[in-house]
């Protein structure tokens, strides 16, 4: 386990990637929630990751909202994934 300073959001994003890769989508979403709440600098990436995980869990309404936010924050591939999940 890692110890995370609640005021420093970057480790949450990093840990969420590991959780995603090991199939723990809900855990990944929870970590990205924390990263976003704590003001992560690259929040386009955080919204993108959370959106993809939500869509894979069949929560496409919320997932597509996150992908839309990611796109508006300049995430380059979010619009392409919106075509896949948000039709």
Image (cartoon, helix red, strand yellow):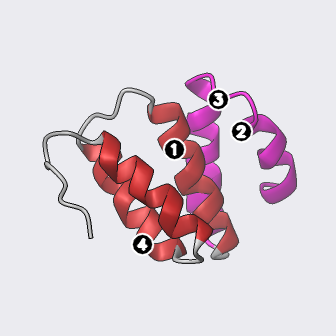
The span from disc 1 to disc 2 (Cα, nearest Å) is 9 Å
Q: Which residue corresponds to the image point at 77% horizontal and 47% vertical from the top-left?
A: 82
Instruction: Using the image as rendered, state which of residue 19 and residue 85 is in the foreground.
Output: 19
Residue 61 at least partly seen: no
Ranked by sequence position, the earlier of labels 1 and 4 is: 4
Q: Which residue corresponds to the image point at 63% horizontal and 76% vertical from the top-left?
A: 57
Residue at the far front: name it.
Answer: 1
The span from disc 2 to disc 4 (Cα, nearest Å) is 21 Å
Query: Which of the labelled discs sits on residue 27, or is there none?
Result: 4
Q: Quadrant of the N terminus?
A: bottom left
Q: Secondary structure at mark 3?
A: loop
What range of the chain is rendered magenta?
59-87
The span from disc 4 to disc 3 (Cα, nearest Å) is 22 Å
Q: Badge 4, how many Cα within 10 Å: few under 14, some, many 20+? A: some
Residue 51 at least partly seen: yes
Q: Badge 3, how many Cα within 10 Å: few under 14, some, many 20+? A: some
Q: Badge 1, how many Cα within 10 Å: few under 14, some, many 20+? A: many
**Picture coordinates of residue 66 (x, y %)?**
56, 47
The span from disc 3 to disc 2 (Cα, nearest Å) is 6 Å
The answer to whether the residue labelled 3 contacts the one labelled 2, judged by CB atoms less than 8 Å apart, is yes
Query: Which of the labelled discs sits on residue 47, or is there none?
Result: 1
Q: Pointer 2: what residue?
A: 78
Say if 28 sits above or below 69 in the image.
Answer: below
Q: Main secondary structure of the magenta part?
A: helix
Q: Pointer 3: what residue?
A: 75
The span from disc 1 to disc 3 (Cα, nearest Å) is 9 Å
Residue 71: within the magenta? Answer: yes
């Amino acid at each position: 386990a890692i110890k995370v300073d609640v005021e420093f959001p970057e480790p949450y994003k990093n840990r969420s990637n590991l959780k995603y890769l090991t199939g723990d989508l809900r855990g990944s979403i929870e970590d990205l929630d924390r990263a976003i709440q704590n003001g992560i600098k690259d929040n386009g990436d955080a919204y993108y990751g959370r959106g993809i995980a939500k869509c894979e869990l069949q929560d496409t309404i919320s997932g597509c909202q996150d992908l839309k936010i990611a796109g508006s924050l300049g995430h380059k591939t979010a619009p392409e994934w919106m075509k896949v999940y948000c039709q």
